[in-house]
Image (tube, rainbow, N blue to C red):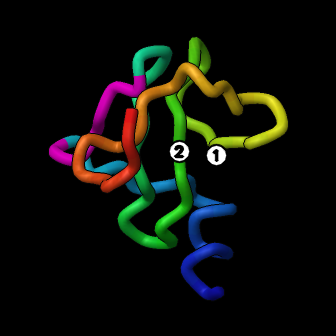
Amino acid sequence: MLMRLICRYVGHKINRQRVWDDGFAFRANCTRCDASLIRDLNGWREFDSEIDANTARKPHPRSNKPQ
């Protein structure tokens, strides 16, 4: 919870070695608070399932979900 507050005020910390492409945009998780992030034209932001959900998006390369 403390890390979420830190990220809210100073921004999320992206591990550039862990970024992956889901077919539509680049995705990553914050190394501090583990929030799911997506990159858009304005930079990195939290993934919003209501706006960003799309069944054509590929799962994480290391997930066990079928494509």
Residue located beneath label 2 in the image: 37
Using the image as rendered, state which of residue 11 and residue 16 is in the foreground: 16
Amino acid bearing label 2: Leu
Q: Pick whichever, 48 or 66, lies toward us.
A: 66
Which residue was labeled with disc 1? 46
Q: Are marks 1 and 2 in contact (CB under 8 Å)?
A: yes
Q: What count of labels does the image hold?
A: 2
Image x and y of residue 17, in percent = 16, 45
- Badge 1 local density, few (<14 within 10 Å), some, or many (20+)? some
Residue drawn at x 65%, y 86% as measured from the top left: 1
Give the left or right position of residue 3, taking residue 50 as reference: left
Q: Is residue 61 left or right of residue 35?
A: left
Q: Which residues are magenta?
A: 17-22
45 within the magenta span: no
Three-letter amino acid code at the position of disc 1: Glu
Please state the horizontal and vertical placement of residue 42, each as a whole percent of the image.
61, 19
> How busy is the neighbourhood of tag 2: few (under 14 within 10 Å), some, or many (20 plus)?
some
Name which residue lies at 74% across and 42% down: 48
Q: Which label belongs to residue 27? A: none
Indicate whether 3 appears above or below 42: below
- In the image, what residue occupies the spot 29% across and 34% down? 20
Could you say whether the residue bearing mark 2 is in a helix, strand or loop?
strand
Above or below, comparing residue 53 to residue 2 in the picture: above
First-in-chain label (1 vs 2): 2
* Residue toward you, 47 or 30: 47
Write down the quadrant of residue 45 in the picture.
Answer: top right
Residue 39 falls left or right of residue 16: right
